[in-house]
Image (tube, helix red, strand yellow):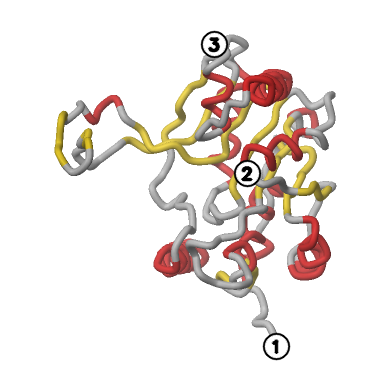
Amino acid sequence: MEARAPMPCACAERVAGGADAADTCAVIVAGGSGERFGDPRGKQFVELAGLPLMCWSVMAFDRAPSVARIVIVCAPERSAEVERDVLSRLTLAKPVELAPSGPTRQDSVRSGLERVPRDLPLVAVHDAARPLVEVEQIEEVVGVVRADASLAGAILATRSVDTLKLVEGTTIVATPDRSFYWAAQTPQVFRTARLVAAHKTAVRDEYQGTDDASLVERLGGRVRVVESTRDNIKVTVPEDLAIAEAALGRRLLC
């Protein structure tokens, strides 16, 4: 079947920015099998608005003035597919390198970090399955880390809007104050040396974190939350794709 042409805004203008601000390497994690999504192609390659889903994340980081380089972490056996179906369909200004994914997301991020030039002081880790991230969000979270030397990192997140319940088995044992709770998103931006050290320590301690921020936090690093929008969703199940398609369609019509 012949692929649909990309929508008109697929190559929108880049946000203006000076070359001296390009101090960040983006690590885009696209190594998951997507079993919950239920598509043999994997959710990263499912079409969204005329392009494979992961294209939209790659384009956002390519347009971000702070980003100097992009590392895409993918399954080694799918690297040719990434080259053919993703990179060949995009006109990118930033150099892109592929890194092999590992058995867990944490392993995959560590693999991507090995390709990050050590002369780039900041690294932004992003899930390829979050296709709606915007350049302005990337720049905001990078800027927060850059501006505050006391920070080890910063992450995009949204405030909890639902009432939360602490449950044992099926019994509610507490209703915590939701004002203290945020839902973590990506990108998560860190000082490169701090994240590399956190991953090395996690390997030594055989520790598996829930995200990269948790690895940095356990070493005492201060990580700030930057409030994000709710449409920066992670496509996990098929119904998420419909939500992303609608949100992206509205954005491209603006």
Query: In the displayed structure, would residue 52 be above or below residue 147?
Result: below
Marks 2 and 1 close (CB-CB < 8 Å): no
Q: Which residue is mark 1?
A: 2
Q: Are marks 3 and 2 in contact (CB under 8 Å)?
A: no
Choose the circle earlier in sequence order: 3 or 2: 2
Residue type, label 1: Glu
Front residue (pair 175, 235): 175
Q: Secondary structure at mark 3?
A: loop
Q: Which residue is mark 2?
A: 104
Image side of residue 225 versus residue 167, left or right: right
Label number found at residue 220: 3
In this rendering, would 148 be left or right of 103? Answer: left
Query: Looking at the image, is 165 positioned above or below residue 94?
Result: above
Query: Residue 81, labelled with which disc?
Result: none
N-terminal of the two: label 2 or label 1? 1
Q: CA distance from mark 2 to mark 1?
A: 34 Å
Is tag 1's residue or tag 3's residue first in the polypeptide sequence?
Answer: 1
Residue under the point 49% across and 58% down: 235
Q: Secondary structure at mark 1?
A: loop
Q: Residues within 10 Å of mark 1 (few under 14, many from 20)?
A: few
Compared with 243, 142 (above or below) is above
Three-letter residue code for mark 3:
Gly
Horizontal and vertical percent for residue 113? 75, 34
Q: Nearer the viewer, residue 212 or 118?
A: 212
Q: What is the crowding at mark 2: few (fewer than 14 residues within 10 Å), some, or many (at least 20)?
A: few
Residue 220's place in the image compared with 186, above or below, is above
- Residue placed at 52% from the left, 26% from the top? 214
Q: Residue 42 in the image: state x and y as whole percent.
A: 61, 66
